[in-house]
Image (cartoon, grey):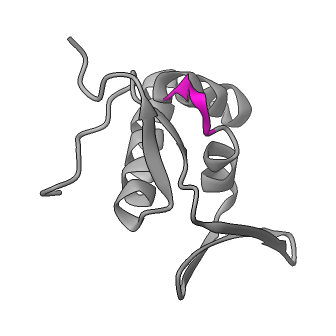
Amino acid sequence: MAGTPALTGSAVLSHATYIQVRKYRGHLIVALDDEAVELDDVTEFIFKRLDGAARVRDIGEAVAAAYEVPVDEATADSIEVLTDLLMGGYVKVADGPLREA
């Protein structure tokens, strides 16, 4: 992951401003330039919570509650999903520290 910051539970992200988001046949599609990705249900759940204020840990707690999984597991999965979206340019770091002090 060279060049991509390591996300932690304290990171705050938001949608990249230059993406296009559409619902198509019940699925959320996120497009950047000529690339588009279809988000699965959990990734869509996470993506919809990126408001520039919620920490990754907060999103992980929401995932844990919605999908009845342990918070640590949901937070780790959220970090993995968000790292992929960050590397793809679909989200950006909005505010807050990337590494916990």
Q: Residue at x 48, y 41 (%)?
A: 78
Task: Give the camera-side residue of 25 and 70.
Answer: 25
Q: Is residue 14 left or right of residue 100?
A: right
Q: Is residue 59 left or right of residue 87?
A: right
Specify the quadrant of the image occupied by residue 101: top left
Q: Is residue 23 magenta?
A: no
Q: Position of residue 49 (x, y in %)?
A: 67, 38
Secondary structure that dominates the magenta span: strand
Relative to residue 76, is residue 42 depicted above or below?
below
55 with respect to 79 (left or right) = right
Please say whether residue 52 is one of the residues in the magenta stretch.
Answer: yes
Residue 23 location in percent, x, y?
82, 69
In the image, the segment drawn in magenta is: 50-55
Q: Residue at x 69, y 25 (%)?
A: 65
Left or right: 12 as drawn, with respect to 8: right
User: Is residue 26 shown above or below 34?
Assistant: above
Q: Quadrant of the N terminus?
A: bottom left
- Residue at point 40%, 66% (across, down): 88
90 and 82: which is toward the camera: 90
